Image (cartoon, rainbow, N blue to C red):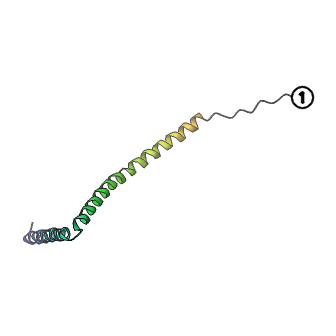
Amino acid sequence: MTARMDETRTKEKDFVTRLADAGEEALQRIADLPGGQKALTAVNDLRTRVDELAKKVRGIDELEARVAKLEKEVAALKKAKTPARRPAPRKPASP
């Protein structure tokens, strides 16, 4: 690596560190406000729910593929089991 790349990474780390510190300070200020703790709790609950929803959504593609495969199998079975139609027996003519 060059010295310039090292310098850029150091600046990025400094920026990220400063941003993290500012975020922590902002969260502390929010927690100190009246009702702030309640708001932070609500935000954390929301984050947890969004994470759970994201996990469920990731599984949808796999389920859709399985359903499509099963639908094809059912269609193939229906075609294989459909018997040829026999003509209905004729009723004898009344004399």
Q: Position of residue 15 (x, y in %)?
A: 14, 72
Displayed quadrant of residue 41: bottom left
On screen, residue 93 above or below 45: above
Quarter holding the N terminus? bottom left
What residue do we see at 50% from left, 43% from top? 72
SS at mark 1 in the image: loop
What residue do we see at 15% from left, 71% from top? 22
The number of numbered badges drawn on the structure is 1
> Is 24 positioned to the left or the right of 72 in the image?
left
Q: Position of residue 70 (x, y in %)?
A: 47, 42
Residue extending farthest left? 3
> Is 89 positioned to the left or the right of 82 in the image?
right
Residue extending farthest front? 34
Displayed quadrant of residue 95: top right
In-front residue for pair 58/41: 41
Residue assigned mark 1:
94
What's the amino acid at mark 1? Ser
On screen, residue 79 above or below 37: above
What residue do we see at 58% from left, 34% from top? 81
> Is 4 positioned to the left or the right of 81 in the image?
left
What residue do we see at 57% from left, 38% from top? 78
In-front residue for pair 20/42: 42
Q: Position of residue 63 (x, y in %)?
A: 41, 47
Q: Position of residue 88 (x, y in %)?
A: 75, 32
Displayed quadrant of residue 89: top right
